Image (cartoon, rainbow, N blue to C red):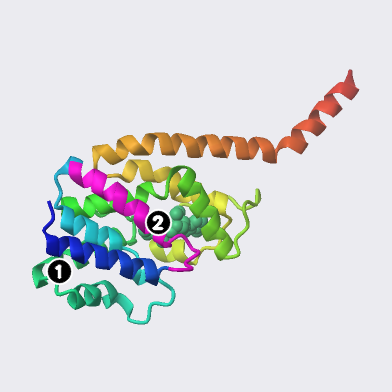
Amino acid sequence: MLTQTQQNMIAQTIAFVKSGSAGESTGHDWWHIYRVEKLALYLAEKEKAELFLVRLAALLHDVDDWKFNAIGSAHAENWLKSLDVDAETIEKVVHIIAQVSYKGAGEDTMPDSIEARVVQDADRLDALGAIGIARAFAYGGSKNREIYDPEVLPVMHADFEAYKTKVSHTINHFYEKLLLLKDRLHTSAARELAEKRHEFMEEFLKNFFEEWNFEEDGRRKIEDRSRK
Ligand code: ADP
Ligand code: NI
């Protein structure tokens, strides 16, 4: 249970994040944060993680990605200071956020607290399934990327630098990242939720290619018939 003061801090943080992320169209909008907080809370209860830390970290995990962010990497920290959150909690939340958004080589460092593992799982779950598909194409569109190009094959990037600079179409993002996420989750509750989301993406891709190849198949059938 949260204290009244903690509940007020959460409410103010919600208002802060909501207003700060207005108009975000690259997948870091308020509703992403809203879903991640909800998922994180669900996982935190299963894992007996500390709810106050999890909620603050989930709410603030993407504020440093806001494109109009003027304060830089201290954004979440400054916000918590302005709320008079105690120094130890601020340090923990900032550490969780740093671990959640870490995208270094290999990308697979295990976060050192259950709170960080829960928030990272929640963030990854929101990149999967129907929502994940919608976010991938919204993100691709915002970066002027094509939906698909059969001549550009997926690349398994060796490091984050290569990953960041590579411009590819959005279908490749499924093979380069989204289909790999289910095996990178830390908690069993998240793995359970990921199953259906993963299957749905596979089904989506199967249909996508069926529709993409429609003309080719049609032509082949006509040719076959003419040979008889
Ligand atoms: P998050 O907001 O979950 O911390 P990211 O900033 O990595 O994660 O990505 C935001 C959203 O945009 C995610 O749904 C992710 O799958 C999608 N995305 C990131 N990079 C690409 C890409 N190269 N192509 C398509 N979608 C992408
Ligand atoms: Ni996120």
In-image side of 174 versus 189 (left or right): right
Q: Is residue 154 above or below residue 198?
A: below
Asked if the magenta segment contains residue 41, the reply would be yes
Residue in front for this viewpoint, 35 or 136? 35
Q: Which residue lies furthest to the top in this view?
A: 228
Image quarter hosting the C terminus: top right
Residue 189: x, y in percent? Answer: 26, 38
Q: Is residue 194 above or below residue 51?
A: above
CA neighbours of label 1 inside 10 A, class few (<14), some (14 to 19), many (20+): few
Residue 60 occupies which quadrant of the picture? bottom left
Residue 88 occupies which quadrant of the picture? bottom left
In-image side of 44 versus 121 (left or right): left
- Amino acid at pointer 1: Glu
Residue pointed to by mark 2: 32
- Label 1 – label 2 distance at C-alpha: 24 Å
Residue 174: x, y in percent? Answer: 49, 47
Looking at the rendering, the stretch of residues picked out in magenta corresponds to 22-45
Q: Residue 91, which numbered label?
A: 1
Residue at left offset 56%, top offset 65%: 143
Question: Can the viewer see residue 133?
Answer: yes
CA neighbours of label 2 inside 10 A, class few (<14), some (14 to 19), many (20+): some
Give the image quadrant in which the ligand numbered 1 is located. Answer: bottom left
Q: Report the mark closest to the observer, 1 or 2.
A: 2
Residue at left offset 45%, top offset 65%: 164
For marks 1 and 2, the one nearer the N-term is: 2
Residue 178: x, y in percent? Answer: 44, 47
Q: In this view, does 161 lie above or below 222?
A: below
